[in-house]
Image: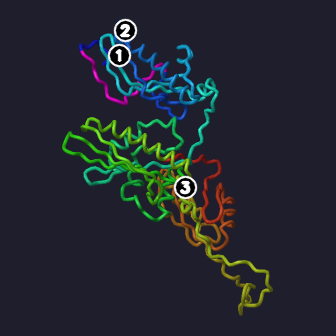
Amino acid sequence: MRGRVASFAMFAAGAAMVLGVTSSRAQDGSGSFEVSGVAVDVTAKTAEAARTGGWRLAQRKGWSMLSQRLTGKAGGLPDGTLDGLVTGIVVENEQIGPNRYIARLGVLFNRARAAEILGVSGFMTRSPPLLLMPVIRSGGTDAVFERETPWHAAWGRFRTGNTAIDYIRPAGNGTDALLMNAGLLGRPGRGWWRSVLDQYGANDVLIPQVTLYRQWPGGPVIGVFRAGYGPDNRDAGSFSLRVASSDGLPALLDTGVKRLDEMYQAALRGGLLRPDPLLDFVAPTDQPVAEETLATPGEDTPLIDDSGAMTLPAEPVATVTLQFDTPGVGAVSAAEASVRGIPGVQSAVTSSLALGGVSLMRVDFAGDPAVLAVALSQRGWSVEGSGNSLRIRRAGQPEAPPPQ
């Protein structure tokens, strides 16, 4: 693609090219400042020299733009210093000729070192972890991860170095399509939402939506974007964009992603983007309030029947939810058997199975859940949490990673 050509060759927008570092580092948005839309036009003796000169020029112009943005004053640095600061060059669009290079580039700068040189803070206040469910409607049907979509691909290309939103972006394979699909949208019950969010380590959910309207095959495309958030898919704003042909669809979606991110950041600053309190709600147990009264026969005192045997009053039954790791089928039956062997446990049934992840067990226990927690510890379990929701692990067992 970089050989000598008679005319300019257009490359696809968004292809990542890296100068002196690996491509994975170029996509590392969390440790970089990003400056996009840097235009260069360089002439040299060869195409290779023109391209190298274009990237050098992009570094200088990118640093000046970053300095202007963070300090209000454009500045410059020697090329040797910039080589140590730049972590990647992102090709947004480029044209290569025999001795000329025209491109629009993005430059990624190391956040910590750049902040130190500019005298600004490299720390960014970020939101709680938020699970991303990108919904696309095209041809009258909705899709999230049921199939590969250009909307999901656009969010995968988005670099999060300059955003305050802590996105959790699922890969879209494996169990993602089962846990998150178009049928989950608007589901009022919080139990399933809590289970899904726990699988990915998120506090709440973001639901960016795009509806595509095509005027005719290959013709103009109109995208209507909406920033939804929370299990109830509440509205944080909307807008529409248009491109002249289907070839511009990736650029339309990339622009939509950036504007939706700006809406989510504005909602975070305005206090609108707060985790749903119902996701942390734990139903109270029907336990009697202890009163310091004199016991009377037939109430809370032990009873003695005709045979002389002592009968204790019945303990109230509490329903406790246990979260436990299930790397395989054997771990499910082993955990259930261990819990059923605890005195006072009336039933222990796995209510939500996630092989390779964290499953949920419903336990009916005659007594205080705190007593159950102590009994689990005595049986070799490491117990976290309190009340009617506990997280148990075998002692010394590492925490299970979220699904990939």
Point 64% across, 27% down: residue: 119
Point 76% across, 90% down: residue: 297
The vertical placement of 182 against 4, above or below, is below
Residue designated by label 1: 101
Q: CA distance from mark 3 to mark 2?
A: 55 Å
In magenta stretch: residue 220:
no
Mark 3 or mark 2, which is nearer to you?
Answer: 2
> In front here: 194 or 253?
253
What x and y, as percent, mark residue 361? 54, 63
Q: CA distance from mark 1 to mark 3?
A: 48 Å
Horizontal side of 324 relative to 157 (left or right) equals: right
Q: Are marks 2 and 1 in contact (CB under 8 Å)?
A: yes
Q: How is the image coloured?
A: rainbow
Secondary structure state at the residue bearing disc 1: strand
Q: Which residues are magenta?
A: 7-20
Q: CA distance from mark 2 to mark 1?
A: 8 Å
Q: Which mark is residue 275?
A: 3
> In front here: 237 or 176?
237
The amino acid type of the residue labelled 1 equals: Tyr
Q: Main secondary structure of the magenta part?
A: loop
The amino acid type of the residue labelled 3 equals: Pro
To which quarter of the image does residue 245 belong? top left
Whether residue 126 is visible, yes or no, is yes
Circle 2 packing at 10 Å, graded few (<14), some (14-19), many (20+), is: some
Whether residue 175 is visible, yes or no, is no
What x and y, as percent, mark residue 134? 40, 48
Q: Earlier in the sequence, mark 3 or mark 2?
A: 2
The N terminus sits in image quarter: top left
